[in-house]
Image (cartoon, coloured by chain):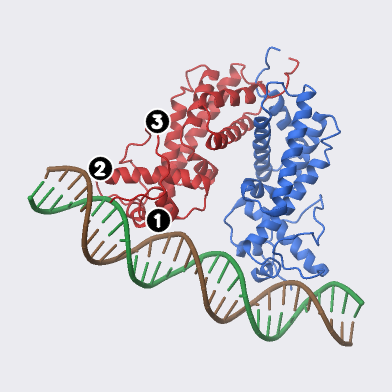
Chain colours: A red, B blue, C brown, D green
Amino acid sequence: MEREGDQVAESSQREPLKLPLPLDGTLRIDRPLRADAARTMRKILEVAEEVLSKDPAATLEKIAAAAGVARTTVYRRFATREALIDAMSEVAMREVEQAIDEGRPETAPPMVAFHQITANLIEIKSGWRFTMNQAHALHGTAAKIHGRIFDKCMRLLERAQASGAIRPEVDLIWARSAYHALIEQAFRERAETGGDPDALAERLIDTLFNGIGPGRPS
Amino acid sequence: MEREGDQVAESSQREPLKLPLPLDGTLRIDRPLRADAARTMRKILEVAEEVLSKDPAATLEKIAAAAGVARTTVYRRFATREALIDAMSEVAMREVEQAIDEGRPETAPPMVAFHQITANLIEIKSGWRFTMNQAHALHGTAAKIHGRIFDKCMRLLERAQASGAIRPEVDLIWARSAYHALIEQAFRERAETGGDPDALAERLIDTLFNGIGPGRPS
DNA sequence: TTTATATGCAACTATGGTGTAGCGGTTTCG
DNA sequence: CGAAACCGCTACACCATAGTTGCATATAAA
């Protein structure tokens, strides 16, 4: 089993998923995975995020190669391409939700939570770009988590508005969209040029809340 | 030649392209097109933007159907799928450049130009989303126009900063990215829910320049 | 009306990606 | 160590899409 494809760079400090997951889709796990198998499955999911976020139409061949694995091995765990994508989306959504929860959006001061969450989101692997852009096509658990994420985001925005951190007349739906768009952009930038998540988060929050203009007459 | 597929809604008030274009790619135009042929070609390009921005992997069959045209007719004008996409990108870039130029970015007061350009961009058909997202893969003329667009955008931002409309410490590259991300978002919203371009532009500019927060101590 | 150009349609080839199956060697784990 | 699980590899069937060709019909233009 020695093989040395064009693997994607190793990762990751956030230590995301502990397989076996309670994944319910059309996965091919009869019973507990052996250690090496679990490792391989993790790697595939991880790499799929990365590859698909760069090229949403990437073939399984490419994904497998990037994971340093034979194409048929992918099929050994995931019945179809769609099953892989579903599983991957679920993992990505889990990571995003965790990044949000760790920012204590319900209890911490809104702006503190915003900083923390933004930095967390920028830090996690860029994979969720693919998932998020397909938000409309999420199935099963991933869709549910996505719904929760949306709600949590809205509640945080409401808290911020109630505390005066967001002007009363601002449409929170739009605010959320704008936030999402800016995060996306920060991602792209980090993917290309690297950079410190905290610094990027700082700048993003500053832009979103204070704008790039000289300030309004209040 | 009567045919009634699932055409895309008719358009458009901006009256964009006047074929025959000085397109230089691998198009299949020997000599001047007949009136109906030019019409068909316009329609195909127009519809391709729309369809591909929703589904970047859409087949030529889908595009042709949306244009109310047989698949083979597409091949009659464009040698390959790629040739169609290139031509489409070129058209989209032309439209965007025109939308910018009409805002007089070099001469009008910066904020006036910003409003005008933003409204113009939101108003034009949503097709350029596909093209802009593939900016890295632009060939030939489209790439050149894209470069010009980038430059014009940066110059406008510099003028705005020089005039005090943008704080001196703001990184203009980031400002440009943020602007782009917000435009993208405004597009999506308009595509889904409709809405007045001017109002959307107003809100976008307000968010970008003043933020959603209560204002900073200046 | 006449001619050249366009279009729809059907039929075809070629290619590439998806998904399956089995064999032989390798790794985990009891 | 030994059984079971895992993985790489080869070979295959299948299907969707790209791209081509020829012909009959329809339309623009002179």
The spot of residue A207 in percent (x, y) is 64, 25
Q: Are marks 3 and 1 on the same chain?
A: yes
Chain of the residue displaying label 1: A
Q: Are marks 2 and 3 on the same chain?
A: yes
Callout 2 environment at 10 Å: few (<14), some (14 to 19), or many (20+)? few
Chain of the residue displaying label 2: A
Q: Secondary structure at mark 3?
A: loop
Left or right of A79 on screen, residue A160: right
Q: Which residue is rendered at x = 35% and y = 42% of the image?
A: A42
Residue underneath mark 1 = A80
Q: Residue furthest top?
A: B217
Nearest to N terminus: mark 2 or mark 3: 3
Q: Secondary structure at mark 2?
A: helix
Residue underneath mark 2 = A35
The spot of residue B8 in percent (x, y) is 69, 57
Whether residue B26 appears in this view of the structure is yes
Residue underneath mark 3 = A14
The spot of residue C10 in percent (x, y) is 60, 80
